[in-house]
Amino acid sequence: MSDHTAVRANTLAWAASHLAAGERIVRADVLLGGITAEMRRLTIGSLNGDTRTLVLRSYVGVGNANHALTREAAALTMLAATEVTAPELVGVDPLAAECEYPSLLMTHLPGRAVLEDKGVEARIPLLARELVAIHAIQPIEQPPIYETLTTADTVVTPPGVNAQAWSAAIEIIRRSAPSYEGRYLHRDFQPGNVLFGGPITALTGVADWASPCWGPADLDVAHCATNLAVLHSAAWGLQFVSAYEAAGGTLAAGPAERQYWLVRDALALSEDIDLISQAWRAAGRPDLTTRAAERRLDAYLTTLLNAT
């Protein structure tokens, strides 16, 4: 899908200023799946006919864009010295001093996000190992402490769900958060932000580093588990938790503590499930209507409450 004209001229000029001598932008295509930012794949041509690709992320009408882009730029710079495969930072204009909107330019990772059911069993151990590697990062400067994405008073209970289960889950997150050993968190580690290439069993990188923070490993694990549960089934969400530990990751010791983080993230998805399911449909999962996603989230939440 070519969408060159959708990128404003001043933004294209800013991106072009970061290219090598003799290079120019020859094409801009929409990248599907983004929720909070507009994403474009820029094809860069050189005088000898070779091409390479970059990714342009622009925040249009989004609050705290400056904050998000500054954090992402710092994360990409730090990750370049780690074993975690992430895009390389090319340029950033967090205040839109030169671009139409706050923007960040980075290298393009090979591969694609894989959301279909086929092959999920093989992908889960790879996702788990990659998240363990992320949590092992020891940043020179600790990122901000995590922020909760929902509260007991903002949870959106979908129609037709197990009302008793949802009420019990809401009461769980009214409690104070358990103590934890801090880790470096991606904060949006889920199948939509992990790329696979060639055979689906080859993980090629992790994208979307706009929200790194410091907090419990359980929080990242719970987020990926929730997404897997809604994309595939509750069983695959729980399988990811087991795979994380099998890969060497450490979670909260007590069942009640683990349940707290898992339930909290499941409830958080309820507030944006319409927007998230819309992005999934655009990325190749037409079966995941909002109602279908709500039913799977309900089944997962009920499973979490029955597991202890």
Image (cartoon, helix red, strand yellow):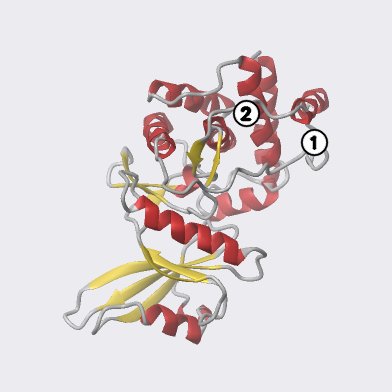
- Residue 287, x across and y down, in percent: 59, 44
Picture layout, residue 54 above or below residue 300: below
Q: Mark 1 highlights which residue? A: 152
Residue 276 is tagged as none
> Going 48% across and 43% down the picture, which residue do you hit?
191
Secondary structure category for the residue under label 1: loop
Nearest the viewer among 140 and 172 is: 140
Mark 2–mark 1 Cα distance, whole angstroms, equals 14 Å
Judge from the rendering whether residue 128 lies leftward or rightward of residue 178; answer left or right: left
Judge from the rendering whether residue 191 lies leftward or rightward of residue 230; answer left or right: left
Query: Residue 25 appears in which quarter of the rendering?
Result: bottom left
The number of numbered badges drawn on the structure is 2
Query: Residue 172 appears in which quarter of the rendering?
Result: top right
**How many other residues sit within 10 Å of disc 2, few (<14), some (14-19) or many (≥20)?**
many
Picture layout, residue 14 above or below residue 185: below
CB within 8 Å, label 2 to label 1: no
- Residue 22, x across and y down, in percent: 24, 84
Look at label 2 and name its amino acid. Answer: Leu
Q: Mark 2 highlights which residue? A: 262
Look at label 1 and name its amino acid. Answer: Ala
Nearest the viewer among 21 and 289 is: 21
Picture layout, residue 204 above or below residue 162: below
> Going 48% across and 53% down the picture, which residue do you hit?
209
- Residue 151, x across and y down, in percent: 76, 39
> Going 43% across and 26% down the picture, which residue do you hit?
249
Nearest the viewer among 128 and 122 is: 128
- Label 2 or label 1, whichever comes before in sequence order: 1
